[in-house]
């Protein structure tokens, strides 16, 4: 059938009219949607249309997320801080969450991302919290201890690491990366490059940038970072666990209202006496609240004293969550509710984002 340019033109014009209408509705309602709420809404719309018309849901999600991202940028250009430079996994997570029309600003450390949000230099930030192979990201937890910045969203990003260099494999003497990435590839490195010296840097993308300047050096980073710095892929998907996923927290911003599938993050300092931790756990049991994460973190002040990071299913405005937090008062010295946010989804689209 011949293509019909006039009909296609009419459809394209309608699409643009609808985007303009979408922006007008938001403008009349007082501004851009919260990204967490927009992402949850987009998910539902995509699921419906993909099923009805048999279209790849990841492509529809990318399209709608871009529309949401450009509407937000049009109405309220907001800076979002992330651990850079570009093509770090934090950058890929920020693109997944905020879309490619957002103003994403690289910072050189996780501490600097917190700082940018606390000082108001960035409206929001994105930081890695935990990894499915390697556990907690200690620099992030340390910053939450000092600065209980609120969390308004989460992103799950599948992580596929690449060994990148401009030096041939048998002449590589040093490998640079962030400690978490080196650890996620520990088994592969021990088996394939046992004699190579490992050096820890502030991010995988910073490692790729330096590797490009130094002969004999390779980096462990995303494939996109390798392309950016003109490095060759020496080995692909070298993570020890093929289902390697990092969970990122979105910092700052307004708190999203309940979506019906939310999680709430807390930091607790529990009274130091026998059975106190068990009593705290019993509060969650009594209120039938499912925990999705628990992590202890040594208190900066003294030995044998710990803070606990917890995450549970539910929103802090749910009656059961409110009742549990009330009951925790008698058992804890410190209770920071970091925030409630819609549960992140690990989508196939992010699988390719992490690798490309
Ligand atoms: O260095 C990066 O690229 C980051 O975004 C940080 C980070 C992390 O610290 O966990 C993020 C995801 C991967 O797990 C490896 C590194």
Image (tube, rainbow, N blue to C red):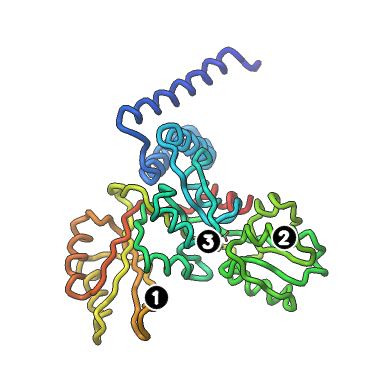
Mark linked to residue 164: 2
Q: Is residue 83 left or right of residue 220?
A: left
Q: What residue sits 56% from the left and 16% below the top? A: 9
Q: Residue at x 69, y 54 (%)?
A: 226
**Which numbered disc flags the more N-terminal residue, 1 or 3?**
3
Is residue 308 visible in the rendered structure shown here?
A: yes
Q: Does residue 295 lie above or below 116 as drawn?
A: below
Location of mark 1 (residue) = 297
> Which residue carries the number 3 mark?
109
Of residues 30 and 189, the one drawn nearer to the viewer in this rendering? 30
10 Å crowding of disc 1: few (<14), some (14-19), many (20+): some
Front residue of 264 and 146: 146
Q: Position of residue 215 (x, y in %)?
A: 79, 64
| Residue 57 in sight | no
Element at label 3: loop
- Of marks 2 and 1, which one's residue comes earlier in the chain? 2
- Label 2 packing within 10 angstroms: few (<14), some (14-19), many (20+): many
The nearer-to-camera label among 3 and 2 is 3
The mark that comes first in sequence, 3 or 2, is 3
Distance between mark 2 and mark 1 Cα atoms: 34 Å
Closer to the observer: label 1 or label 3?
A: 3
Residue 134 image position (x, y, % from top left): 52, 71
Element at badge 2? strand
Name the residue located 53 percent from the left edge and 69 percent from the top edge. 133
Disc 1 to disc 3, C-alpha distance:
20 Å
Where is 28 relative to 180, above or below?
above
Spatial CA span between label 3 and label 2: 22 Å
* Residue 44 left/right relative to 287: right
The number of numbered badges drawn on the structure is: 3
């Amino acid at each position: 059938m011949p293509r019909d340019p006039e009909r296609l033109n009419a459809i394209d014009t309608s699409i643009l009219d609808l985007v303009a209408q979408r922006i007008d509705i938001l403008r009349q309602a007082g501004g851009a949607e919260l990204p967490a709420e927009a992402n949850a809404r987009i998910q539902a719309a995509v699921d419906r249309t993909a099923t009805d018309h048999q279209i790849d849901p990841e492509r529809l999600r990318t399209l709608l997320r871009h529309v949401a991202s450009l509407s937000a940028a049009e109405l309220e250009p907001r800076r979002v801080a992330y651990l850079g430079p570009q093509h770090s996994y934090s950058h890929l997570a920020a693109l997944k969450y905020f879309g490619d029309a957002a103003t994403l600003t690289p910072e050189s450390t996780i501490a600097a991302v917190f700082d940018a949000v606390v000082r108001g230099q960035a409206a929001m930030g994105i930081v890695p919290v935990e990894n499915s192979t390697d556990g907690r990201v200690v620099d992030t937890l340390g910053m939450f201890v000092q600065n209980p910045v609120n969390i308004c969203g989460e992103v799950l990003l599948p992580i596929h690491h690449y060994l990148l260099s401009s030096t041939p494999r048998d002449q590589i003497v040093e490998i640079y990366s962030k400690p978490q990435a080196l650890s996620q590839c520990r088994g592969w490195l021990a088996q394939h490059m046992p004699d190579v010296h490992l050096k820890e840097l502030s991010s995988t993308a910073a490692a790729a940038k330096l590797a490009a300047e130094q002969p004999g050096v390779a980096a462990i980073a995303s494939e996109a970072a390798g392309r950016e710095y003109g490095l060759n892929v020496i080995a692909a998907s070298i993570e020890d666990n093929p289902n390697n996923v990092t969970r990122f927290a979105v910092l700052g911003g307004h708190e999203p209202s309940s979506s019906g599938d939310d999680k709430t993050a807390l930091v607790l300092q529990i009274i130091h006496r026998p059975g106190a931790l068990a009593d705290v756990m019993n509060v969650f049991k009594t209120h039938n609240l499912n925990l999705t994460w628990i992590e202890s973190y040594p208190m900066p002040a003294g030995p044998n004293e710990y803070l606990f990071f917890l995450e549970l299913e539910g929103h802090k405005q749910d009656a059961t969550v409110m009742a549990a937090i009330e009951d925790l008062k008698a058992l804890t010295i410190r209770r920071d509710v970091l925030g409630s946010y819609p549960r992140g989804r690990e989508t196939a689209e992010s699988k390719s984002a992490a690798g490309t």
